[in-house]
Each structure stands twice: as C-alpha cells, then as structure tokens.
Image: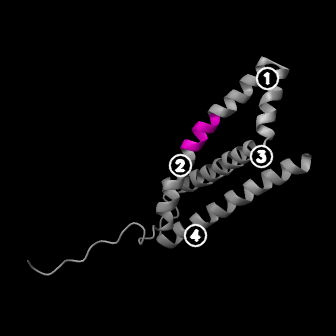
Amino acid sequence: MGKARPLSPHLQVYRLPLPAVMSITHRMTGVILASGTILLTAWLVALAYGPQSFAFAMMVVGHPLGQLVLFGYSAALFYHMCNGIRHLNWDRGQGLEIEQVYRSGKITIAVALILTAALWAALYSLI
C-alpha cells in the first residue's frame, strides 16, 4: 500500500460557517412555525367552543412550559421573518459579497433577538 491519505475531519471538529448555520436554522424555524400554527388553531378552536374550553387553553398557555413554547414560537417567527427579508434582498442581487453575507447574518440574529425581547417585555408590562 502507498502512503496513508489524510482523513477528512469529523463533524464534531468541523465548524459550520454562519451562512450554513443560518440556512439550517431557517428551515428548522419553518417547521416550528408550521407546528406552532396547529397549536394556535387549537387555541382559536377552544375560544370558539366557549368559556370553559378557553379557560382550559389559557391555563395551558399560562403554565411555565406553555410560556416557554410561546417564547420559542415567537423567537422562531421573528428569526424566520428577518431571515426571509434577508433572502429577499439576495433575490434582488444585493448583499451577496461574503463580508455582506456575514454582516447581514449578524444583523438578522440581533434584530430577531431584539424583536423577541421587545414583544415579551411588552406582554409582561401588560400583566
């Protein structure tokens, strides 16, 4: 046998670039939003069924686990929206240089975090 050829790095060693991570996350948030819309529909159906059903739905939503699910849904919604706007700019041919792709990715993440925090701060200020 000849020389041993170098092996490619394992996935645990390889660090995905930011655009790849954001692409994977965009797909995941799409699935989360589709699943969460089913829960939103169940909440609206409970509202239509009357006060007892709606009270039960509100009890579920008011539980800390329900709040965590709602927080995750809202974070997914804002991330997916911001990243979708970023993709629309790419479709127009803007921001396709590597440094612009990374900058817009960081801005997308920051804006999604700010919008999520602002929503939840506004919601808890109403309580």
Q: What's the mark number on residue 53?
A: 1
Q: Position of residue 85 (x, y in %)?
A: 59, 52
Q: Which residue is mark 2?
A: 28
Is 122 above or below relative to 56?
A: below
Disc with the residue nearer the chain's start (1 vs 2): 2
> Of all residues shown, which one is farthest toward the top?
49
Disc with the residue nearer the chain's start (1 vs 3): 1
Front residue of 98/92: it is: 98
Instruction: Give the SS element for disc 3.
Output: helix
**In screen coordinates, is 59 left or right of 89?**
right
Q: How many marks?
A: 4
Disc with the residue nearer the chain's start (3 vs 2): 2
Q: Which residue is mark 4?
A: 103
57 inside magenta stretch: no
Say if mark 1 contacts mark 2, CB within 8 Å.
no
Task: Please name the residue shown 67% across and 57% down the image.
Answer: 112
Instruction: Give the SS element for disc 2.
Output: helix
Instruction: Give the prevailing secondary structure in the magenta stretch.
Output: helix
The mark closer to the camera, 2 or 4, is 2
Amino acid type, residue under disc 1 in the picture: Ser
Instruction: Give the SS element for disc 4.
Output: helix
Q: Which residue is mark 3?
A: 64
